[in-house]
Image (cartoon, helix red, strand yellow):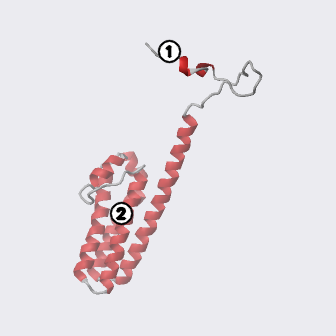
Amino acid sequence: MSVNLYNKAYASMKETLPQFKNPEEAISFYLEGGSKYLAKAAKAAEENRIEDRSNLSDKALLIFSGILSHLEQASAEEKKALKPFIEYCYSMNELILHMNMKNDVEMAHSLAAEVKRMAEDWKGKAQENFSKKQQETSLRSPEKTNITSLPSDGSSTPFYPAANDLSTADFSA
C-alpha cells in the first residue's frame, strides 16, 4: 500500500501530516489518535458529559472509518493479508457505537486501552519493517573498495591512484 494514499485519506483530519516511513507507521499514528479520542471520551462519560463523549467517540469512529475506506482501495492480495485488521476495524466501529448507546464508562476505558495496545503493536511492526529495509538496502549497496597498494616510499598508508594529487588534476571536458 502506498503511504501517499494514507496521507490523502486523512488530509481533512489534520492540517499538517507527518511523513511516514511505511504504511505500518501511518496505521500506528492513526490508531494512537483513535486511542486518545477514546480515552477522552471515557473521561467525558465518567463526568456524564454526554455531548463531549459523543463528539470524541465520533472522531475515533472517523479514524476507523477512514482506515477502512482506504483499505477498500487495496489490491485483493493486500486485502487478504490485512483481513484480520480489517475485521478489527469493523469490530471497533461496532463496539464504539455500542459504548456510545450505553454510555458505558468501563467499556470506553477498555476500548481506549485496546486501541492503544494495537497502535503500539503497529508501531513495533513499523520499526521492525523499517530496520529490515535499512539492512536490505545496506546489503545491496555496493561496498566501497579500497586499493591498498603500498606506496613507493614503503609506508603502509593505503594508496588511491585516482586521487594522487587533485590540486593538479585537469577537470576540463
Classify mark 2: helix, strand or loop: helix
Q: Residues within 10 Å of mark 2 (few under 14, many from 20)?
A: many
Judge whether 87 appears above or below 133 on screen. Answer: below
Residue at (43% x, 51% y) in the render: 81
**Left or right: 23 in relation to 63:** right
Three-letter code, disc 2:
Cys
Residue at (37% x, 59% y) in the render: 86
- Where residue 144 sits: x, y (%)? 60, 30
Judge whether 25 appears above or below 162 on screen. Answer: below
Question: Going from the N terminus, do you reach mark 2 or mark 1 first?
Answer: 2
Q: CA distance from mark 2 to mark 1?
A: 64 Å
Residue furthest out toward the top:
173
Q: Which mark is residue 170?
A: 1
- Where residue 113 sits: x, y (%)? 43, 73
- Where residue 136 sits: x, y (%)? 54, 40
Residue at (75% x, 25% y) in the render: 155
Disc 2 + disc 1, Cβ < 8 Å: no
Residue furthest out toward the front:
167
Identify residue for label 2. 89
Classify mark 1: helix, strand or loop: loop
Three-letter code, disc 1:
Asp
Residue furthest out toward the bottom:
47
Q: Residues within 10 Å of mark 1 (few under 14, many from 20)?
A: few
